[in-house]
Amino acid sequence: MEYCKKPVILASSSERRIFLLKQLGAGFIAVNHRLQVEPQFDGSVPLGRFVQDLALKKAESLQEDYPDNFIIGSDTVICLNGTVYGKPKDFDDAFNTIKELSGKTHEVYTGVSLFNKLKNVYITAYDKTFVKVKPLNNNEIKNYLNKYPPFDKAGSYGIQDENGIIDSYRGSFENVLGLPVQKLIPLLNEYHLI
């Protein structure tokens, strides 16, 4: 089991990603990625490719500190009718995002990467989940955002929030939380990491 000598590095400080990786039984350390500026989607590549590339960039940003560790990177964005939303800049941005999503179905894309510089491993994958938001009025949106701070969440919401704003979803719940575990498990198994 040579691959287990060093812990896996999760290139994220997201509580939800940490929780999901713990559920898989991986021995890991969470270290926030070092990307200073996250690229914005410009339409030059498909959205699935974009989140995979960004997940890999996040993992690669830690390669100098952890050259012999397997590093997991992940990135989530949402898309509604061709408009892509990441994390909100401020409360108004979060409010406007939720207002746009209200009563509609959008797509959640999460990319994941498994990277190890010394072993020359550069694997990426992504998943897509369809999520429908309940119809909401302005007060309901404000109350929700005050109860559940949106600033670390793509799309300004959490699918896990109790009495939250999600009406239904189709696809992977974990993908919306921020880690496409169904895509990640085969990669971790391949290198004996779980």
Image (tube, rainbow, N blue to C red):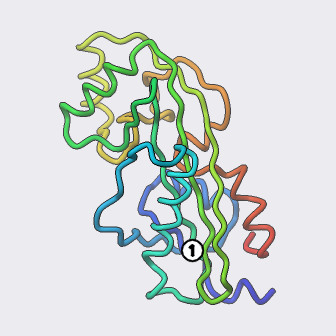
Residue at 74% in and 65% down: 187
Q: Quadrant of residue 46 in the image?
A: top right
- From the top left corner, tell me how far across and down residue 123 is, in percent: 66, 67
Q: Quadrant of residue 86 in the image?
A: top left
Q: Is residue 69 left or right of residue 1?
A: left
What residue did someone put label 1 on? 71
Residue at 33% in and 35% down: 148
Q: Which of 28 and 63 is in front in this view?
A: 63
Identity of the residue furthest to the front in this view: 44
Give the quadrant of the C terminus: bottom right
Q: In the image, what residue type sits under mark 1? A: Ile
Residue at 44% in and 12% down: 103
Asked if residue 14 is positioned above or below residue 170 in the image, the reply reads: below
Give the quadrant of the N terminus: bottom right
Asked if residue 185 is positioned above or below residue 129 in the image, the reply reads: below
Count numbered badges in the picture: 1
- From the top left corner, tell me how far across and down residue 22 is, in percent: 61, 61
Residue at 50% in and 35% down: 160
Q: Which of 119 and 193 is in front in this view?
A: 119
Label 1: how many Cα within 10 Å (few below 14, some 14–19, many 20+): many
Asked if residue 31 is positioned above or below residue 134 in the image, the reply reads: below
- From the top left corner, tell me how far across and down residue 20 is, in percent: 60, 54
Asked if residue 23 is positioned above or below residue 1 in the image, the reply reads: above
- From the top left corner, tell me how far across and down residue 109 is, in percent: 54, 41
Q: Quadrant of residue 102 in the image?
A: top left
Q: Is mark 1 on a helix, strand or loop?
A: strand
